[in-house]
Image (cartoon, rainbow, N blue to C red):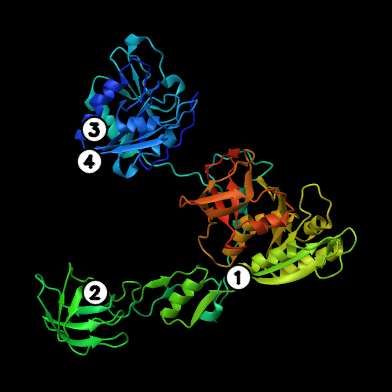
Amino acid sequence: MSVPFNNPLPIPVLGFCAYSGTGKTTLLKKLIPELNRRGLRLAVVKHAHHNFDVDIPGKDSYEMRKAGARQMLVASHVRWALMTEDPVEEAPELPHLLAQIEADKVDIVLVEGFKKLALPKVELHRAAHGKPFIHTHDEHIQAIACCDDTQLPSDLRRLDINDVGQIADFVIEYANNWRPCTPSLPLAPECGCELDTSKTLSVRQGIDKILSYVTPVSVTEEVAIDDSTDRVLAQDAISPVDVPQHTNSAMDGFAFAYSDPMLDSYKLVGDVMAGHSYQGTLNPGEAVRIMTGAPMPDGADTVQMKEMAEDRGDTVSFRGNISLGQHVRQAGEDIAKDHTALSAGHRLKAAHQGMLASLGFGKLPVYRRPKVAVFSTGDEVCQPGEPLKPNCIYDSNRFTIKSMVKQLGCEVIDLGILEDNEAALVDALQVAAQQADVVISSGGVSVGDADFIKLALAKVGQINFWRINMRPGRPLAFGQIGDSLFFGLPGNPVAVMVSFMQFVQPALRKLAGEQEWTPTLVPAIADCTLRSRTGRTEFTRGVYHLGSDGRLHVTSTGAQGSGMLSSMVKGNCLIVIAEKDEQLNVGDTVYIQPFADLL
């Protein structure tokens, strides 16, 4: 049985495995110089089966290590070696060992031993030894280097164990064809190998089904650039000017015409300040003082910063290396005139607005804001600010949903709290659908519930009730009421926010005209054990921070009850545990969805 292996390096790792006495080390001693001769840079990892030592008793490094130094690094001008004392019961983990290798200085890592690991390998076999094959129980064998007497199945790549050149050819071919594995991201598009979803849907399937019903709004309007925040650009913004408009200096310094060799000194003939220009053309041997952003004079093509110049009043001389065109920003090098500065479909934020303002745009064509109607149902729900009735709860979901809808630049229609009355709900849903592009409620969508909302929905629209393979947020209702989309979110407060993030958010973004939006997923190191169930996507509330190692780390907020709103307040992200994962351990890479875009 193979032990799982994940290559932590951006370069290929190839193992050589065989039973003892087959000649692994003998082969590698011949193969390594042959690969070096062909220009391949190698690292080698060897698994030793005994208490080995690479140091010599009596040497300073040996005595310091034996005195208690856990790590001992000894170095000279020709080599350095790091020895680490790390007693473990089992064999050391190969991914940890590989992480010690300077991958930028190596093309491939050859591994001798670690036979049980599920890493790509070349098996060595000699028929005379009478040993069984490894490939029969290891699907990761890429080829078998064997003797002439060995009988192999025809579908296996056969190499001559005595032909080092042929084996070197294979290693180089493997290195050239190797590609790093694409990380399996949670919420990635369907690949066709998912679990049976006749009764339930994966998160991705739910998203794709919903998006197939969404048609972006087509009505546009012009708004002042000050009013365009979070609006979606409806037409490509074509730059009416070059940015920068003039070829200008990137430094405070001196502008002149480059020559090779440079002159000993240049005659100073003027000063050019930002917002002004030099009237005339510089002749060879002339220079001007120039400020950052000031237009380059005709006849000048190079700038030397003032710190590398000696200004004598009427002449200037330069120090240091100078290259043609240095410290000069060409007209249009940022944005060229008549080129697209920003494509339609972008949601406008501060940086977009600033850039478009710099091009002279005072008004922008944007899509109409989607209108979203939000309501709560239930006789047990009370309006915040009013006395709490016996056996009731304050309405929180409506306010959470409204806030998230506003964050996405949509117009909110607040229908308040609707009573548990079928006729009243039917009337409210019909009115909402006439006013809004999207109608959102929460609660009463669990399969088997007898809530009035389900009876009303059956009369006014086409609604699907889905079980989504996720936690929290398993029940979801989605459909159409007239020309409007309807979302029935779960009733638990945390489930409402999680379901909105995964399903309503992409629908509203597409509806608003935003193109090619995908949720932000950021890798982080788990600082706690995270558990789920295979076949289900788990959204755990988490807190991420930048660790002392310069990487993002994340831990859960603690208890994960669906009604615990405080966990969303404490957290700053969702930790997304994919369907394939049952448990993630401390130190594993996980993916997080930051709250910043929405919450």
The residue under the point 21% across, 73% down is 308
Quick one: 132 or 11, which is closer to the camera? 11
Give the side of residue 392 with respect to residue 43, left or right: right
Spatial CA distance of label 4 from label 1 is 62 Å
| Amino acid type, mark 1 | Gly
Foreground tag (3 vs 4): 4
> Where residue 421 sits in the image (x, y, percent)?
87, 62
Residue 332 falls in which quadrant of the image? bottom left
Residue of label 2: 307
> Where residue 440 sits in the image (x, y, percent)?
71, 62
Residue of label 1: 409
Which sits earlier in the primary sequence, circle 3 or circle 4? 3
The answer to whether mark 1 and mark 3 are in CB contact below 8 A is: no
Which sits earlier in the primary sequence, circle 1 or circle 3? 3
Quick one: 444 or 79, which is closer to the camera? 79
> Where residue 494 sits in the image (x, y, percent)?
70, 55
> Where residue 499 sits in the image (x, y, percent)?
66, 55
Quick one: 202 or 348, which is closer to the camera? 348
Which sits earlier in the primary sequence, circle 2 or circle 1? 2
| Amino acid type, mark 2 | Glu
User: Can I make out residue 387 in this image?
Assistant: yes
The answer to whether mark 2 and mark 1 are in CB contact below 8 A is: no
SS label for mark 2: helix
Residue of label 4: 77
| Amino acid type, mark 3 | Leu
Which sits earlier in the primary sequence, circle 2 or circle 3? 3
